[in-house]
Amino acid sequence: MKQLCTLTLFFTFFSLPLLSQSTPSVKINELMASNSAAVADPDFGEYGDWVELFNTDSLPADISGYYLTDNFSQPQKWRLPLTGVIIPAQGYLIIWCDDHNTGLHANFKLSASGEVVGLYAPNGSVVDSVSFGQQETDISFGRFPDGENDWYNFFPSTPGLPNYEDNITSKCPEPEISLQPGFYPAPVTVSLSTTMGGAEVRYTTDGSEPRENSNLYSAPIQIDSTTVLRAKTFKLQSFPSKTVTGTYFINFNSSLPVFSLSTDPANFFSDSAGIYVTGTNGITGYCSSIPRNWNQDWERPISLEFFEEDKSRAFAANAGVKIYGGCTRLYDEKSLGVYFRDRYGDSKIYHKIFKDSYLYEFNNLVLRNAGQDWYRTMIREGMINALIKGRMMIDQQEYRPSILFINGRYWGIHNIREKLNEHYLYYHYNIPEDQLDLIEFGSKPDVKAGDSVAYYQMYNFLKYHDISIDTNYQVAKSMIDIDQYIDYNIIEIFAANGDWPANNTKLFRDRRGGKWRWLLYDLDYCYNGNSEGMYNTNTLKYMLDSVNTISTSPAWATMIFRRLMANQEFRNEFTQRMAAHMSSTFDYNRTMSIIDSVRNLVADEIPRHKARWTKSISFGSSWTQQIQLIRDFAQQRASKMRSFFYDWYGIPGAFSVTLTTNDSTAGRLIAHTVNIPWNTKPIFFKSIPLKLWAMPNPGYRFVRWEGFVNQTGEKLELLPNQNIALKAIFEPAESTDSNLVINEINYKSSSLYDTGDWVEFYNPSPDSVNISGYKFYDSSDNPPFVFPEGSVIPPLGYFTVCQDTAKFKFFHEHAENYTGNFAFGLSSSGETVYIADPADRILDSVAYSSTAPWDPKANGDGFTLALINPELDNNLADSWKAGKKLGTPSARNDVYTKIHELKGDVPSSFSMSQNFPNPFNPETKILVTLPENCEMKLTVYDALGTEVEVLAKGDFAAGSYEFFFSGAKLASGVYFYRISAGNYSEVKKMLLLR
């Protein structure tokens, strides 16, 4: 009989057996890296990965304090308990590799795609190790005989038993199904077969996995109603095939996409183990004092199929499922979290589930029951997401309504959502989990990733410092993404979220120098969705009043916002940006249109959903009446919100701005980052500065303002006390986007200074170039990066696109005009990068290489590829050199690019032009003419006479030269530039305005 080791947690007072005194002869004897339902661990009742150790010696082996790892470069990754870990002679020890990091549960999991396992002694010596390839689910990999050198697959697995020869297995092929799963107008007949001699096919129609005693296939199967057919091949002394699953929908039509979930009914509905029922094995919590199975953090294996609106089967995968959400677990229809993991098959699915998102791979999804809105409309959160999408700097979940079937039975509307976790942040921000701080607030802070050290540093700084002082506010801005935080609070406050901020708050940061950002979710109580979320609910007061608060807005939860609102710059921006959104994003007519569009997505499905779940949409007299409450909120909220600002801050009223233009296609109007439509009359608050920007579209330039002011600058800052009118005048401009230059490329950073990949573009024209909607991509098949709204390259300016903005900003804190993150990496062996306009017209491309004649120092040594001269052919290797370490984003390239061009005939006299443009920001150019060969020096000084930069020094041939000077890292002010050439010298001044 196999002897199992136990972890001794007590002292005994009798003699211990004699132990092996030398390094124990312990072997890694068997492992399972994909455990779906084979062996459950005795401590947590989960199906985790495991490793079996075998003591080949005739004496017990004490391996207390030894190490187990799945990474040979980290031999001390996980340590066994320091005492009491003794393997009997010829005995066995099971270690669960399940991330629990307690007892005999390691802090890592095994990869079903293959990896290594090593056992190390405390002195660092290797006791045993093994590498393994792709593993099949529920099949173990082990030695036969025990402790010997030959490895085999075993089914069933043998933890706690010898690795028997009879268990060595081959695998059956999957059965073949005659008819493609999908939608059919009438009953169908399906045939099953196998190519394996002597094998048989067994099947089920109740959602369960076929077993040896399931229905034996002998004749075609008649399917008269919607059915899940699951089939598997069996043969004696062979491992059964994978289960083939297909759903046949009979006479079912819907305009929504459809999920079909199949699982053993006991996984959902048995009293002892079912996750969907009250059951007999539950725990309290989530608004229930009665123990409920659905409160357990149980995960059950499922098969999941997804059918698109056109009825095509987009993917089918094995996965795990858990009950998801908080108190809505009490509802008849529950939210589900779906997890794609190695142990079920694939760790990801690849499909563009959300049509407006660039993401096409997922390792988890949420099928949400609409949360608290289950009783009301089912669309409230989806409507709010559509309302702010592309309008605010908000991190939010994508939304798409769908239908769910469970084991062939209609289960109603479920909204597909992204899960806001470490995977979301990796896909959207390229933040690895080990570089992430993610914190969720409910009744207390809950660290989901990383730690809370930086959070409390930020929180305590705000709590104990006067943020009205500018220097303190600047520190706060270095820790918080202020623009994002303003938008986040605007939507939560305007929408009157009655279940926030003490609940439903998540924030995150990239530990590599990133700032805190907040995640938006759980908006079911908004827009007249709860008694504390009505159109007249003064959420502004709840957020600003530290004394008279409600349960969801205690002082600790509002402290950050209150402290920041004490700063005038923050308060002014928050107040006028709220006004801008109320006149555009939250405009009544716009909101009505969005309500209708989201309503229409599910309107035809509501009667069938309501018939399935009679308690759903049961508040109020009808679904239409409940949607009217959302409409009422949209109509009445803005005027109420303005009155809250008047009352709290004593603002003396508001004024309107009539905004017109000579050509509505020529440009856009931006107010405090918000896009305001032309020919409207937005309302803003009096006594607070108003910031407007007339942004020309590609192909146009801004000329002037008319009306209340007559100015030529694109940007205005006004302080009106009455209604005003402004007209923006644009005119066609010569095409400048075609002159864009790929100017600097960082395709492989140094390991010590990893800025992530990035590419810089240069605009050589005297006009701004709006590249919003333009595309950046490489030679791979990855989706292109689309430049977001507001991406503008100034005249003679730069713009950088980054693979990872947090990494980039950490090393380039003074960089300006950058965006990200693109979801692909630049090749370190060379490839082609492109920038194209929205019509896919390529504006510039560079085919670079990491080998000669291209400068190889740019390949991992910390240097960038820098274009010597923006007017050179940037597809020629000779036009590039390795620039300075870390590169020069937001500024002209280093010393190799100072001389811009040698022009024309030999001039007749010495001269140095006035810089152009002047004033400038951030770059300007200076023209020098030399009538003869001479030594020349061109130097820039600040107002105190301190040398800032030498633009040129050395022997120059007669001719005309242009030199560029960048003030990207300098303060605004007057600067002087001086030339000394032969007997000629001259000094001029220039003005940098930031």
Image (cartoon, rainbow, N blue to C red):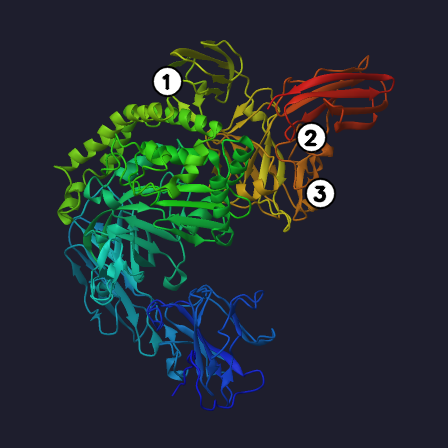
Circle 1 residue: 652
Q: Secondary structure at mark 2?
A: loop
Q: Which mark is residue 869?
A: 2
Q: Tell me where residue 889 appears, x and y as whole percent.
A: 62, 35
> From mark 1 to mark 2, how far is it between C-alphas?
55 Å
Q: Position of residue 671 (x, y in %)?
A: 43, 23
Task: Give the residue number, with chain letter if any, for mark 3.
Answer: 853
Packing grade of label 1 (10 A; few <14, some 14-19, many >=20) is: few
Residue at position x 57%, y 86% from top?
Answer: 21
Earlier residue among tags 3 and 1: 1
**Residue 914 is at least partly visible in this image:** yes
Kindly check if marks 3 and 1 are in contact, taking CB atoms under 8 A apart as contact.
Answer: no
Front residue of 895/993: it is 993
| Residue 662 visible, this orientation | no
Left or right of 727 in this view: 377: left
Q: Of the residues shown, which amino acid type is indicated by label 3?
A: Pro
Which SS class for mark 3? loop
- Judged by depth in the image, the label closer to the viewer, 1 or 2, is 1
Q: Residue at x 38, y 61 (%)?
A: 345
- Looking at the rendered image, the quarter that the N terminus falls into is bottom left
Q: Nearer the viewer, mark 2 or mark 3?
A: 2
Q: Residues within 10 Å of mark 2 (few under 14, many from 20)?
A: some
